[in-house]
Amino acid sequence: MATLGFLAAETSTVRLHFGVAILPYRSPFLLAQGVATLDHLSGGRVTLGVGVGYLRPEFDALGVDYNERHELTDEALVAMKLAWSGRTVFLETSHWRACGNSILPRPPSKPHPPIWMGGNTRRAMERAVTSCDGWYPLEQPPARALYTRTAPISGVPGLRRRLGELRILIDQHGRERSLDVCFLRKTGWLTLRPTEMLEEIALLEDIGVTWIGTGFESRSMADFIEKVYTFAEVVRPSSTLISAPPI
């Protein structure tokens, strides 16, 4: 929240993206208030990526029951949307009670800042379809997926299979609104030649991806910035997935 607030003040067009806020760690009303403030100050530029969480030691350190993480996530999604509505909230769960609470000012994003559900599991996908504005899958090899307690996705072929399952869920639940898909590939883009990179990004767009996320392994801040510019110089002129104007 602090970092995005700093970036909101230093920029005017870039999206401010949480990747991701673990909902069970926080009071949904405090998170909703912070996000509303950030969205208000940035002129409606917030995208809220959310997750269920998987690290038991963090749950223990925060005094949160790990086994209730899915219930807490579902409750938080309901509570935040009500809080952002501008109406007085009357709602009670086994974890909290809102007796006429309200949050003002409302975030300028309508009806609220976009929410992207992170995670590769079918449960995360279904939650994205029924309760969110986007799905936020990440490339995970099988060994890593066991540790993070999610489903593996290995490259574009793995994502293509999962997107087929996502379309089935969309049909089953009768969702009519569009659903963003942001594929997070933490590293690896710069190991490809520029033509290969563009071909892969074009393929992602063809199979239904609307945004891409990435990271860069770097030895220093200067090395990191150089890699960001290298990546941007290749992909921005050629892909509608990289659509934000210059800062």
Image: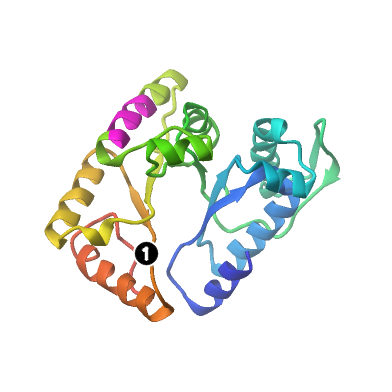
User: How far from the left and from the top, in percent, is residue 173?
Assistant: 47, 21
Residue at image x 65%, y 32%?
A: 70
Residue at image x 41%, y 26%?
A: 170
Work out whether residue 98 or residue 22 is closer to the camera in this orientation and state it. 22
Q: Is residue 162 left or right of residue 194?
A: right
Q: What residue did someone put label 1 on? A: 216
Q: Quadrant of the C terminus?
A: bottom left
Residue type at mark 1: give it. Phe
Q: Which color scheme does this rendered protein use?
A: rainbow
The picture quadrant where one finds residue 98 is top right
User: How far from the left and from the top, in percent, is residue 226?
Assistant: 31, 77
Residue at image x 67%, y 35%?
A: 69
Check the image and report above or below for 181 versus 121: below
Magenta residues, dominant SS class: helix
Q: Quadrant of the N terminus?
A: bottom right
State the residue lying farthest toward the front: 143
User: Does the magenta segment cover residue 137?
Assistant: no
Q: Residues within 10 Å of mark 1 (few under 14, many from 20)?
A: some
Q: Is residue 244 left or right of residue 108?
A: left
The picture quadrant where one finds residue 81 is top right
Q: Which residues are magenta?
A: 158-167
User: Does the magenta segment cover residue 162?
Assistant: yes
